[in-house]
Structures are given as structure tokens and as C-alpha cells.
Image (tube, rainbow, N blue to C red):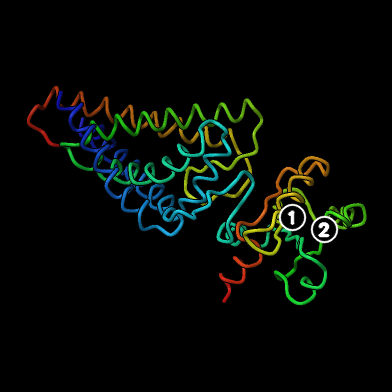
Amino acid sequence: MRLLRDTGVLLLAAAIPALVAAWFHPELRGSDRMPLRRYEITVATALEWGSAVVWLDARNFDRFTRQHVPGAMWFTVEDWEERLPTLLENWHSGMHIVVYCEGGGCDLSEQLAMRLRTEGGLSDVYFLHGGWDAWQARHR
Amino acid sequence: MKARSCLSVIARISISGTFLFAGIQKAAHPAQLESEIMRYRLVPEWLGWASATYLPYLEVICGAALLFSRTRRAAQLILGALLFTFLLAIASAWIRGLDINCGCFGSKNSGGSDYLWWLVRDSALLLVLCLANLEHARHQTTNPTSNL
């Protein structure tokens, strides 16, 4: 009986900070909170992977030349045939591929990531939550 | 006899530290944890969010509760159930050939799917937890007034 009561107390005790986090933690709160979709990662995660990441910029060439993630390759769905061999030359097993486009509203990065997974046969491909905007916000 | 009790205490402190560390890591990156939970393809989105919000704090609370004699058994029960659930989830992802991150220690994972290591590690933790519980029960039977 005491075991049951203590178990209940611990379960409830954990709910208190969880509720506070749900309300205040920036990754959890707010009506506009977007849960990460499958294969979507945050800038923080990509940074933790460090140098084991091949960055792909799926924005238009003009924006890419203006500014991009250091070391990123320009790769759009339209130039698939031309770009894929170059990507495969730069990628080796154990490296993550992270695709980004302009910001939260674009879906080019997700399209490209999914195509690289399905048609390109690559399994470690992700797209960046918040895209280039999120990267810039993090490095401001 | 004393040596066995000492080992039991060391085991409890180790498991406590492991869950405190894991819980704090996960609590700091709940969105990442949610994403990793969803990659197991076992729960709907709302439950993935709820788990990512609640589980880190449950691990922290139970990790701390392991250190106190009054709450030790309840903490062992909950952590044992959690470890068993994690083992089932990892095994099921392995069987289905999913490409996942463990999600076991927040976002500090390498990114690859090292199923065997995760299963061995969680099984070892569960075994140590059970042994510590058995030793504690045996100790309580022989020394009912002890708080060890």
C-alpha cells in the first residue's frame, strides 16, 4: 500500500516541473509551437554533430552566393542529376546530410531530403527546422 | 555482508546519477527528444509531445528519489518500468529496421543507430536496479531498523 502511494507521489511530483516546462520552455510553449516532423532537426542538433555534417543549401543560387552556412553545397531539386554525384563525392558513411531552405514556411528542404532518402538511397538525411532564418538567428 | 551492502549503495548511486544526468539532458532539449520519440513510430504526435515534456522530469525525480530510503522502492519500480519500456521500444525499432537516435541521453547522441549497444546498456541498468532492489529487500529482512 505504501509502495503504491509513494509511486503515485513520485509520478505526481514529476508532473509539476513538466507542467511548468510545458508553459515556459521555449521549445514547448505557445500555440504556434511546431513539433518537429520526421527527419526534421533543430540548429542545435546540427551544431552538436559538428564537422560530421554535409550542409545542402536548397535556396536559389542568388541567395546562396550572397550568404550560406559555412561549407554548404548548393543543391536544388531541379539540378538533381548534376548535383547528386558531387554530393556523393563529398559524403562518406557516418556523415549526416542536413538540407535547409529559406525559413519556416518553405518546404524545398524537406522535399530534397525525402528525395535523397528515397531516390538517392541515403539514410542519414535531415532537414533544418526554421531553415536559413533559424541558422541566422542562432549566429546573430 | 557489508561488502554486498556497499555494492548495493554504489549501484543505487550510479543508477541515480545516470538518470539524473539523462533527465537533465533531455529536459534541456525537449523538441529534440520529441523528434526522437516520433522516429520510433510507436505513439501519436500528442503523446510524443507529452512524453518529451514529462519523462525527463520523471527520470530526474526518480533518480533523486533512489537516494532516499523512504522513496527508494517506488523509484526502483518506476525506473524499472521505464527501462523495460525503453528496451521494448528499441527492440521493436531494430526489428522494423528504423533509422533512429536512441533518445536515451538527450541530444548528445552520435546520430547512428547502435541498437545492440543500447539494448546491452539498458539491460545492464535494469539488471543492476533489480539486484540492488533484491539486496535492499534482503538487508531489510535481516536488519528491519536499518535505513541503508
Work out whether residue A99 or residue B6 is closer to the camera in this orientation and state it: A99
Q: Residue furthest left?
A: B145
Closest to the observer: A8 or A130? A130
The crowding category of the residue bearing disc 2, from other C-alpha atoms within 10 Å (few below 14, some 14 to 19, many at least 20), is many
Q: Is residue B106 above or below residue A46?
A: above
Neighbours of disc 1 within 10 Å: few (<14), some (14-19), many (20+): many
Residue B133 appears left or right of B147: right
Front-most of residues A97 and A32: A32
Chain ID of residue with mark 2: A
From the image, tell me which residue sits under label 2.
A76
Left or right, A65 with reference to B67 = right
The amino acid pointed to by label 2 is: Thr
- Going by the picture, which residue comes out furthest to the right? A82
What chain letter is assigned to the residue under label 1? A
Residue found at the far front of this picture:
A31
Q: Position of residue B120 (x, y in %)?
A: 51, 32
Question: At 49% from the left edge and 54% from the top edge, which residue is drawn?
Answer: A33
The secondary element bearing badge 2 is classed as loop
Quickly name the residue at label 1.
A108
Circle 1/circle 2 CB separation < 8 Å: yes
Q: Residue at 81% of width from left, 64% of height from top? A: A74
Q: Secondary structure at mark 1?
A: helix
Question: Where's residue A83, x and y in %?
Answer: 88, 57
Report whether A59 appears left or right of B115: right
Residue drawn at (51%, 32%), measured in percent from left and top? B43
Identify residue type, mark 1: Leu
B141 or B25: nearer the viewer: B25
